[in-house]
Image (spheres, rainbow, N blue to C red):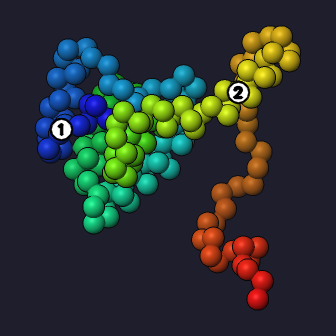
Amino acid sequence: MEFLEGIKSVEEGEKKLRDFFSQKKLVMGFGHRVYKNGDPRSDIIKDHSRRLSESPVGKKVLYQTSERVESIMVQEKKIFPNLDFFSASAYNQCGIPTEFFTPIFVISRITGWTAHIIEQRQENKLIRPKSKYTGPERMTFVPIEKREANRAPK
């Protein structure tokens, strides 16, 4: 988010990105150790960021600049955004201060980290987890108020 803060137009964002390239500076929010060809989670939060930007209090320029940065990074550097890149613009549009982003990222990951530590101590070895999703295919979203199981008895 620090990269995007203060940018007033998409063109200004592109210029700043190209300045980073020429100075060989790192652009945060891109690349992933596992997801070399794009983080599938990123598309989900990107859509939320877009929808937030279209709301009456949304920040269209922030989202549009994020999209341009993503496009240039993919086309020119072949590096895809990770989950954190569009999470930052979504959090910002929700009014969350930038200094809270890292704690939120950590909170969302702490359960998995803890589970890995417990497993590693039980097995007395370092585990490099890999998983393959075996659950149901993409399902249609049903708003909570329309779900049968959540209706209060009459």
Is residue 38 visible to the viewer in this orientation of the structure? no
- What residue is shown at x 41% (from left), y 36% (from top)? 100
Choose top left, top right, bottom left or bottom right for residue 117: top right
- What residue is shown at x 83% (from left), y 10% (from top)? 124
Q: Which residue is mark 2?
A: 114
Mark 2 residue crowding within 10 angstroms, few (<14) / some (14–19) / many (20+): few
* Left or right position of 144 against 4: right
Choose top left, top right, bottom left or bottom right for residue 143: bottom right
* Left or right position of 22 against 117: left
What is the spatial separation of the Cα atoms under label 2 and label 1, in whole angstroms?
A: 37 Å
Mark 1 residue crowding within 10 angstroms, few (<14) / some (14–19) / many (20+): few
Of discs 2 and 1, which sits in the foreground? Answer: 2
Q: Position of residue 121 (x, y in %)?
A: 81, 15
Q: What's the amino acid at mark 1? A: Gly
Q: Position of residue 28 (x, y in %)?
A: 36, 26
Q: Which residue is mark 1?
A: 6
Point out the image quarter for the C terminus: bottom right
* Left or right position of 153 against 28: right
Label pair 2/1, CB-CB below 8 angstroms: no
